[in-house]
């Protein structure tokens, strides 16, 4: 299973959801709301050293922006593939001289 499995779906209720792993979160329905929320999360993530804000906001902002922007979606997909390959490859044991 991918680290960030992204599924943008509209159920019968019409609300947009984003799903990563086993967690699901509702996202704003309009494009400008998703973009502004994603940008706000990215700015908050950059200021993660402050007490209320945190670095957890960066990946969440990237995830929201990957819905709308192809370059961000490509970056997220490459990260998924890299992590999947790293996780699937057998771990090499290192000896004392390595």
Image (cartoon, rainbow, N blue to C red):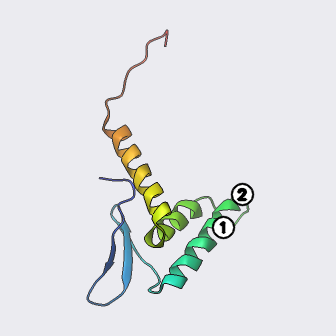
Which numbered mark, 1 or 2, is in the foreground of this view?
Answer: 1
Q: Nearer the viewer, residue 84 or 78?
A: 78
Corner quadrant of residue 25 = bottom left
Q: Is residue 81 left or right of residue 55?
A: left
> Residue farthest to the right?
50
Q: From this view, report whether residue 92 is shown above or below residue 47.
A: above
Q: Nearer the viewer, residue 97 or 35?
A: 35
Q: Which residue is mark 1?
A: 44
Q: Which residue is mark 2?
A: 49
Q: Residue at x 53, y 83 (%)?
A: 33
Where residue 32 sits: x, y (%)? 54, 84
Where residue 51 sits: x, y (%)? 72, 63
Q: Is residue 84 left or right of residue 54?
A: left
> Residue farthest to the bottom?
13
Corner quadrant of residue 23 = bottom left
Local SS, label 2: loop
Give whichever of discs 1 and 2 has the lower sequence position.
Answer: 1
Q: Residue at x 40, y 55 (%)?
A: 77
Q: Nearer the viewer, residue 38 or 55?
A: 38
């Amino acid at each position: 299973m991918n680290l960030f499995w992204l599924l943008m779906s509209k159920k019968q209720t019409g609300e947009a959801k984003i799903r990563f792993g086993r967690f699901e979160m509702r996202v704003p329905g309009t494009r400008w709301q998703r973009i502004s929320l994603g940008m706000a999360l990215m700015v908050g993530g950059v200021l993660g050293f402050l007490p209320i804000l945190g670095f957890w906001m960066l990946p969440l902002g990237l995830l929201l922006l990957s819905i709308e922007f192809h370059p961000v979606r490509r970056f997220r997909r490459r990260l998924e593939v890299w992590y999947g390959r790293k996780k699937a490859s057998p771990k090499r044991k290192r000896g004392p001289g390595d």
